[in-house]
Amino acid sequence: MASSDAGTDSPGSRQAGEPPSDRPVRVQVLPESHSLHPSSILFFFIARIRSYLIPAIVAAFAAAAGSSFLAFLLGLGFLVAIVVDGVRLYTLRYHIAGGELVVRQGILFRQHRTIPLVRIQNIDLLQNPLHRLLGVAEVRVETASGSDPEATLRVLSLAEVDRLKHRIHDESPEGIGSETIPSMIPPDLPREQELHRLDPRDLITLGLISNRGAVLVAVAAGAFYEFELHERLDWGMAERVVRAFWPANLAVAVVVSFLLGMGVLLILRILGVFWCLLRFYGYQLTTDDENLRVHAGMFTKVSATIPRPHVQFISIHRSVLARWFSRASIRIETAGGGARANEDAQSTISRRWFLPIVRESAVGPLMGALRQGLAWNEDALAWHSVHPHAIRRLVRKSVILSMAFSCIGLVFWWPFGIFAGPILLPGLVWHAKRYAASLRYARSDTGIAFRSGVLLEKTSVTFFDKIQVVDVLQTPFDRRWNMAQLRIDTAAAGPAEHRIHAQLLEAEFARDEFIAISHLILS
């Protein structure tokens, strides 16, 4: 009896002796998965040692005092952490297919992460001396979804980095820049245009005008007190030595104090120079029309790539010393370029330290290179100042604040604390006047510019195609003075440390600007 489904094309229905069907058989080809470089376990181990260093020191002191339980717990925790890292290493697999970067890891708790290539904002590479010795690099993938890297591949061989670079370009549905991931090999300069380079003189100038030396001293002081080293010093002997050698003559004492102060300041500046040389040695900014690339670092080399269309916000910073030296720094923000916990210049060199120092004469051309078609000339912008009564309002606020300081002074130091307010009042009034004079707002054909700051002057610009939110705010005090605040936000995450928040504007002007900007955003 003939089967009712003998005419089907299923493999089980074809009778013996029948010719094979001409219909092609579909075979699902799974993308080839790749794992991390075998040396990754070494870098995981080193990272764990660094994170357990301070607890290990505490445990060592506890063991010396006769308590070994803390050391046992620390060793057990370290062992568990190493096992967890080993599982992550040997189960992590990644591949690129269908315009997505897919990362999988875990045994009991499996994690499957899919990153569309079109959403990738930044892909940075990091190489410390050990990376370079082993011929590997750490790859950090960032998107606009948050401040932390969306994926960290620790670590890949340089050959695998180049292979991944070409796969991202080939698989990207929108043809992301031909070299989204930079090679740790020196860039092919004939194909790229060099925008800026820092020589040792620039780095020395940066160290002299920055406060990085004071930051290093603050970190050292924190560690000094964290380990309670101050309790082991003989402060009484130090006081006796100072009294023995300190000059009795008042004029000589003043001169010695001045020289000591200048010596401390010089040491701080030398430390700042040392920090800048380590961090930005060999700094180079290049472009290939699609991407901006930054290479820097003496021992730990950082290579960062920023797709130029993803730049949301550009900010120019000028400190007092920078203005004296006719220098500035430029920071940028991308949608995925937020600050993160325990960040340093290595992780934010592509934004917070994008252009650490540049001559004033080069600011305009570099701004045009960061945003195609931008003709940047701050002096030519139609700057709009604050409300005519803004200074009077801020001065009144300063007077009220000084009265509050007098009241606080009376509480802690009766009756002489009352003079705290009058002493601080001139400085508060000066700052109020300077702050009101520093606020400037301008709207051009391409975007919005805003300037503020007294000691640290910041001038920022964003563009109409990057603006996410624009609104007008009026507090009860604003309405009393017929003022308003104009706030403009983008998808950028804040490493430039400046916002376009124009305060103390005339209310009618702020409302007119709100309407004009809203139309330009929608058009």
Image (cartoon, rainbow, N blue to C red):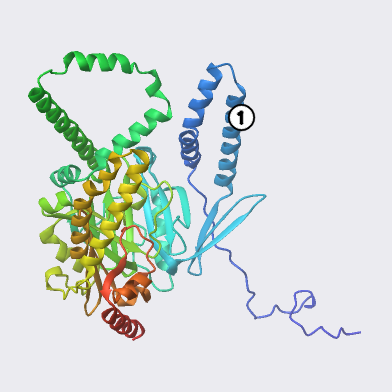
Q: 382 or 75, which is in the foreground?
A: 382
Picture coordinates of residue 323 (x, y %)?
Answer: 13, 54
Q: 294 or 503, which is in the foreground?
A: 503
Picture coordinates of residue 13 (x, y %)?
Answer: 79, 78
Up/down of 246 relative to 140, above or below = above
Tag count = 1
- Binning the other alpha carbons within 10 Å of mark 1 as few (below 14), some (14 to 19) or many (20 upward) gives few
Query: Which quadrant is home to the C terminus?
Result: bottom left
36 sits left or right of 437 in the view: right
Q: 32 or 16, which is in the foreground?
A: 32
| Residue located 31% across and 68% down the image | 501
Up/down of 57 relative to 135, above or below = above
Where is residue 134, by image quadrant? top left
Q: Is residue 194 visible?
A: no
361 sits left or right of 98 in the view: left
| Residue located 55% across and 51% down the image | 92
SS for callout 1: helix
Up/down of 3 relative to 261, above or below = below
Where is residue 327, by image quadrant? bottom left
Q: Is residue 21 visible?
A: yes
Identify residue type, mark 1: Leu
Furthest toward the front, the residue is 415
| Residue located 48% across and 42% down the image | 40
Picture coordinates of residue 470 (x, y %)?
Answer: 36, 76
Picture coordinates of residue 483 (x, y %)?
Answer: 29, 75
Furthest toward the right, the residue is 1
Residue that label 1 marks: 73
Q: 427 or 63, which is in the foreground?
A: 427
Query: Which quadrant is home to the N terminus?
Result: bottom right
